[in-house]
Amino acid sequence: MQFIKNLTPKQRVAFFIISAIILVGIIFFIITFINRIGKIGVTVQYAPYSAKVTLNGTQVKNNSKIWLQPGSYKVIVEFEHFESVERVVEISGDYNYIIGTLKTVDDEGEAYVNSHKQEFIDVEGLVGDALNKEGIAIKKKYPILNYLPINNRLYSISYAYTDDNEPIINVKATPEYLDVAVRKLKSLKNVDLTIYQINFLTTNPFTSYSEKSKSTPEDTIKSTFNLSNYKLSSGQNIADNYYAATIYKYDYDKDLIYSHYRVLLKKSDNKWHIVADPQPLFTSKNTQDIPVDIINSANSLEP
């Protein structure tokens, strides 16, 4: 206080103004820091920069850096005379871009591009780095993509993406080599197959049926499915109220066992019920509301 008393009136005014500015700066820094805790700095840069950008329905400033919680965001970019973009972006510590360019739909759009070329040049310079980071982030989240595609004379395993940017695994094989493709999937290291949507492009003979539940799981399977050209393996009980077995073909001429389809049942009201279409491999996508440990047990059946 003595320090302030020794100041002249003008010095005191200057002191209080400077102190107020410093205090406001400190408060602003603290608030900003708190608001950014747990968030990621994200570059938002869509050419043209006058385009409207919304994330999950909330408009954000284009050509800027914003702070977001990690997660999925529905991005919509719109501007007159340009084709709108709608996509889902997964923001994480490995990927922090929302960037791209809009395509023109008429001559006025082309004229706008010609008068704002630098905006498009700037964004295109970022796209390569962003695509590389996006690819790394997706493969980190979905490790199976590190192994795909796989193509050989017996089968092929490829992938595509849903609108939500989740991979769909497509397996193409003739019935004789379906089991070989499944074994290959199960051999992939550090891959949790249960999280993926896996489409087997081989015709599934067991997707159309009318369940006839019985008091034993074997009788339910035999009554529900036409097994005239198939055999039923010995099954196993899982966690008291689940049962898994495989339906497969046997070629007597070639002494070949092939084309296994796993079937999973659950006991309810003293009867056994089919919980999902028989599949070469179960996942959480094709076996809804079934615990993962049950799925893994069913998948562990040979082959």
Image: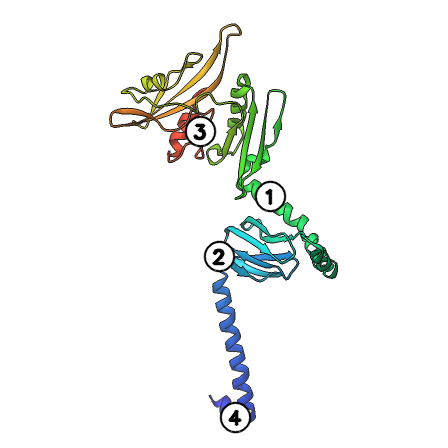
Q: Which residue is under mark 1?
A: 136
Q: Residue at x 55, y 41 (%)?
A: 140
Count of marks placed on residues: 4
Q: Amino acid type of disc 2?
A: Gly
Q: Which percent across, then down, holds residue 177?
A: 55, 19
Q: Which percent across, then down, holds residue 68?
A: 52, 57
Of circles 4 and 3, the one toward us is 3
Secondary structure of the residue carrying tag 1 is helix
Would you say the residues marked 4 and 3 are in contact, meaning their CB atoms lie under 8 Å apart?
no
The disc, 1 or 3, on the residue closer to the chain's N-terminal end is 1
Q: Which residue is under mark 4?
A: 6
Of circles 3 and 2, the one toward us is 3
The disc, 4 or 3, on the residue closer to the chain's N-terminal end is 4
Mark 4–mark 3 Cα distance, whole angstroms, equals 82 Å
Q: Is residue 243 above or below residue 122?
A: above
Report the front residue among 120 and 125. 120
Label 1 Cα crowd, 10 Å radius (few <14 / some 14-19 / many 20+): some
